Image (cartoon, helix red, strand yellow):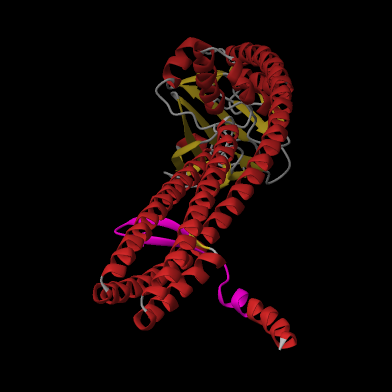
């Protein structure tokens, strides 16, 4: 018999430990959350209480006494649960303070990671909500203790009236079943809250790591910015020096351009006033570095330079043949046909047989055909009152209204009209008055040389 009892007790203990494992649950009622811990002892006490209540229905006052002792054990368990709640709440408060310290340290770098600060504020709010939940759970534990005390009073009253005791026992059994359901629901809520807290901790760790990475990147970028600023300062200094050099070169070129126009014998200022009314269209004789140097000129110099570009583009500064010799000069001479003194209003050029005759400046054809002693002739208007004539041509390659470019073929050298041999009679007219083309060729030579 003793051996049987010796074997039965360990088995009973093991079975009870499996059936009444410690449980921690959250109870949510009317929007409030309360935290309840059911230890193994309290569960066993509740089960024993239920058994005792049933026993009381059959054995009377003896069962009441046993139930009273079970109830006292339940109160002790509730007090222990209360203490456990307070400890857990204190731990959560300390953890919240630690998280706030982390948030405070993160706020020192809020300028670089405002997103982290927002996340920390959200986490702090969640922690405050958890603290409220734990406080509510503690209050619920106190309420449960009071409820247990009331139950004890009712059980004592049941000793005086077995009928009233039976009715109270049934009511208490229903409440215990309801409490078990609430505890199960609270346990599920506690598991969800724990998972949420774990997720929050992981997110906080990731945010801290991201902040550290951003700080390292900022330091690296700061070094790169400093280096780029130094290089920019060096480039700016070199640019300023270059602009000064180009500006000096541009002013020299401006003077040379004015001298070139003056070599033609024309009034520079008069031409510039006319050029102010014409759009600039570029020109073949302006060096590229001079145009780039305009950034170093003041407004008046730049405007004068633009007008000079228009004038230089308009002036016929080259000969109408690629290869030539001058056989007849501008001015007074003996007429080659009758030997009498005469005025020659142009220059005669000879070259290889059937040489192409070229436009000496861009413009528009205003005459193309036969014209008395000129024979076959082309006349081009270049603007600014300047026109050129090409006479005694063998053939004409343009027509009236055609726009011609610089050095474009307009015909072939010939012997048409009043002529003693194959050549080109070339005239330059300014406002209808003939000018010596040689002066324009000299000016053109000055431009090419520059």
Asked whether 56 or 441 is in front, the reply is: 56
Q: Using residue 434 as the reference point, say whether residue 449 is left or right of it.
A: right
Identity of the residue drawn at 58% across and 35% down: 101
The answer to whether 174 is drawn above or below residue 90 in the figure is below
Identity of the residue drawn at 45% across and 70% down: 66
Q: Position of residue 363 (x, y in %)?
A: 49, 35
Asked whether 87 or 324 is in front, the reply is: 87
Q: Is residue 330 visible?
A: no
The answer to whether 107 is drawn above or below residue 450 in the figure is below
Q: Using residue 32 as the reference point, say whether residue 365 is left or right of it.
A: right
Asked whether 5 or 392 is in front, the reply is: 5
Image quadrant in which you'd find residue 12: bottom right
Q: Position of residue 226 (x, y in %)?
A: 71, 25
The answer to whether 26 is drawn above or below residue 448 in the figure is below
**Residue 26 within the segment the image draws in magenta:** yes
Identity of the residue drawn at 67% across and 36% down: 215
Identity of the residue drawn at 41% across and 74% down: 62
Q: Position of residue 18 (x, y in %)?
A: 61, 77
**Residue 16 within the segment the image draws in magenta:** yes
Q: Position of residue 147 (x, y in %)?
A: 34, 59
Q: Is residue 338 visible?
A: yes
Asked whether 411 or 331 is in front, the reply is: 411
User: On the rendered image, what quadrant is the N terminus found in?
Assistant: bottom right
User: On the rendered image, what quadrant is the C terminus found in?
Assistant: top right
Image quadrant in which you'd find residue 219: top right
Q: How many marks?
A: 0
Q: Which residues are magenta?
A: 15-36
């Amino acid at each position: 018999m003793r051996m049987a009892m010796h074997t039965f007790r360990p088995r009973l203990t093991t079975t009870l430990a499996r059936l009444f494992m410690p449980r921690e649950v959250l109870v949510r009622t009317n929007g409030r959350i309360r935290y309840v811990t059911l230890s193994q002892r309290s569960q066993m006490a509740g089960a024993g209480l239920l058994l005792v209540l049933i026993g009381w229905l059959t054995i009377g006052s003896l069962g009441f006494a046993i139930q009273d002792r079970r109830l006292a054990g339940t109160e002790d368990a509730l007090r222990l649960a209360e203490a456990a709640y307070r400890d857990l709440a204190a731990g959560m408060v300390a953890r919240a303070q630690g998280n706030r310290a982390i948030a405070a340290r993160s706020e020192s770098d809020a300028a670089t990671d405002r997103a982290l600060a927002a996340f920390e504020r959200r986490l702090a709010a969640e922690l405050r909500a958890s603290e409220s939940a734990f406080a509510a759970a503690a209050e619920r534990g106190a309420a449960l203790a009071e409820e247990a005390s009331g139950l004890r009073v009712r059980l004592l009253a049941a000793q005086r009236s077995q009928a009233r005791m039976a009715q109270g026992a049934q009511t208490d059994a229903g409440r215990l079943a309801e409490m078990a359901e609430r505890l199960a629901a609270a346990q599920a809520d506690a598991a969800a809250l724990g998972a949420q807290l774990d997720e929050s901790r992981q997110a906080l760790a990731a945010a801290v790591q991201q902040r550290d990475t951003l700080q390292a990147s900022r330091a690296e970028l700061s070094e790169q910015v400093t280096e780029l600023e130094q290089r920019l300062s060096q480039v700016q200094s070199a640019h300023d020096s270059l602009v000064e050099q180009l500006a000096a070169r541009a002013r020299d070129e401006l003077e040379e351009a004015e001298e070139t126009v003056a070599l033609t014998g024309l009034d520079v200022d008069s031409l510039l006033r006319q050029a102010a009314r014409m759009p600039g269209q570029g020109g073949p004789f302006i060096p590229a570095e001079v145009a780039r140097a305009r950034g170093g000129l003041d407004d008046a110099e730049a405007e004068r330079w633009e007008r000079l570009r228009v004038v230089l583009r308009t002036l016929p500064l080259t000969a109408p043949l690629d290869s030539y010799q001058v056989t007849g000069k501008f001015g007074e001479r003996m007429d080659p046909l009758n030997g009498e003194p005469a005025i020659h209003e142009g220059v005669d050029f000879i070259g290889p047989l059937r040489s192409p005759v070229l436009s000496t400046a861009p413009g528009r054809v205003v005459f193309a055909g036969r014209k008395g002693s000129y024979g076959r002739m082309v006349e081009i208007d270049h603007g600014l009152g300047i026109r050129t004539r090409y006479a005694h041509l063998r053939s004409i390659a343009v027509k009236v209204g055609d726009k011609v470019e610089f050095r474009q073929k307009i015909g072939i050298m010939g012997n048409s009209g009043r002529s003693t041999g194959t050549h080109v009679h070339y005239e330059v007219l300014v406002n209808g008055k003939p000018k010596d083309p040689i002066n324009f060729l000299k000016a053109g030579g000055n431009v090419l040389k520059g």
